Image (spheres, helix red, strand yellow):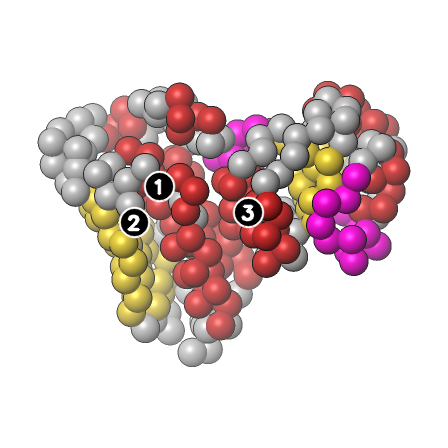
């Protein structure tokens, strides 16, 4: 199953809508609750990052019987120092983002914690592409 | 304790989800930091927060948290309440501070996550 969504930069009132929709789809596909939770937490963190830090982007999800693949791609401005950005507590969040309850520098670390495989392609003045893979080792999807 | 007990202990007001006041809750987590909430693995949690915006409801939804206590009389917007209703999340407000609410609930048996 393949689904794709647009995410608007700065649209905080709708941040999380894509994750909510995907959660509904995963429930319909009968994934186990533990799988759904880690997939959706990682996706939500990534979605908020696109809203908060990028010029906007897309989220695509591929759900297979054995795995879920999610690509989160924005159009920039990119992360100049990825190692630093992966450090818990490091953040470039604006006051507006902090008012939303985010921007504590835990997002990427939380994404890494919840994914089985994570690849991030980024750089200064470049788009950011986050590829998150989740194994459904116990065959929790019956779709 | 039940959500009805929570309401009584913090002198709270239920803004939506009255039907769920018999629901048991065993763990409490107090935070205005939603990324911190998203690190929690347990489901059976009362989120105690002063952050009254859409992301508090969204974070609860993503974390499978079915009850939120807003402290210091924070009033969720209609959009927030509609979102909470859509996902079966009970919303309670209290005039007490986060510290006082947490202390009272802890003293009555609500367990910490960590």
Disc 3 to disc 1, C-alpha distance? 15 Å
Q: Nearer the viewer, residue B2 or A69?
A: B2
The residue segment tinted magenta is B13-38
Provide the secondary structure element on which disc 3 rests: helix
- Residue under the point 39% across and 35% down: A107
Pointers 1 and 2 within a single chain: yes
- Using the image, tell me which numbered label, if any, was put on residue A7: 2
Look at the image and tell me in which quarter the N terminus of chain A lies: bottom left
Which of the two marks, 3 or 1, is nearer to us in this view?
3
Category of crowding for the residue at label 1, using alpha-carbon neighbours closer than 10 angstroms: few (below 14), some (14–19), many (at least 20): few
Please say if B34 is above or below B61. Answer: above
Looking at the image, residue B43 sits to the left or right of residue A49; the answer is right
Is B22 contained in the magenta span? yes
- Using the image, tell me which numbered label, if any, was put on residue A11: 1
Mark 1 in CB contact with mark 2 (< 8 angstroms): yes
- Using the image, tell me which numbered label, if any, was put on residue B97: none
- Residue under the point 54% across and 36% down: B53
Q: Which residue is mark 3?
A: B79
Category of crowding for the residue at label 3, using alpha-carbon neighbours closer than 10 angstroms: few (below 14), some (14–19), many (at least 20): few
Give percent across and percent down for residue B87: 60, 57
Viewer can see residue B39: no
Tell which residue pokes out farthest to the bottom in this image.
A143
């Amino acid at each position: 199953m393949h689904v794709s969504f647009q995410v608007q930069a700065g649209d905080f009132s709708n941040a999380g809508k894509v994750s909510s929709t995907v959660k509904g789809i995963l429930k319909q596909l009968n994934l186990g609750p533990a799988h759904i939770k880690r997939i959706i937490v990682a996706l939500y963190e990534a979605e908020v990052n696109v809203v908060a830090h990028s010029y906007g982007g897309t989220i695509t999800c591929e759900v297979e019987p054995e795995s879920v693949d999610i690509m989160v791609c924005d159009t920039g401005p990119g992360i100049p120092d990825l190692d630093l950005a992966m450090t818990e507590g490091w953040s470039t969040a604006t006051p507006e983002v902090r008012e939303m309850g985010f921007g504590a520098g835990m997002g990427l670390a939380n994404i890494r914690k919840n994914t089985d495989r994570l690849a991030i392609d980024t750089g200064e003045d470049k788009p950011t592409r986050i590829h998150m893979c989740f194994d459904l080792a116990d065959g929790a999807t019956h779709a | 304790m039940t959500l009805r007990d929570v309401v009584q202990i913090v002198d709270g007001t239920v803004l939506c989800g009255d039907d769920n006041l018999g629901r048991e809750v065993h763990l409490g987590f107090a935070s205005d930091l939603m990324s911190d909430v998203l690190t929690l693995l347990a489901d059976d949690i009362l989120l105690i927060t002063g952050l009254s915006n859409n992301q508090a409801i969204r974070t609860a939804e993503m974390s499978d948290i079915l009850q939120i206590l807003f402290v210091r009389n924070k009033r969720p917007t209609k959009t927030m309440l509609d979102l909470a209703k859509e996902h079966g999340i009970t919303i309670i407000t209290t005039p007490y501070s986060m510290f006082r609410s947490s202390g009272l609930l802890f003293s009555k048996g609500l367990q910490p996550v960590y």
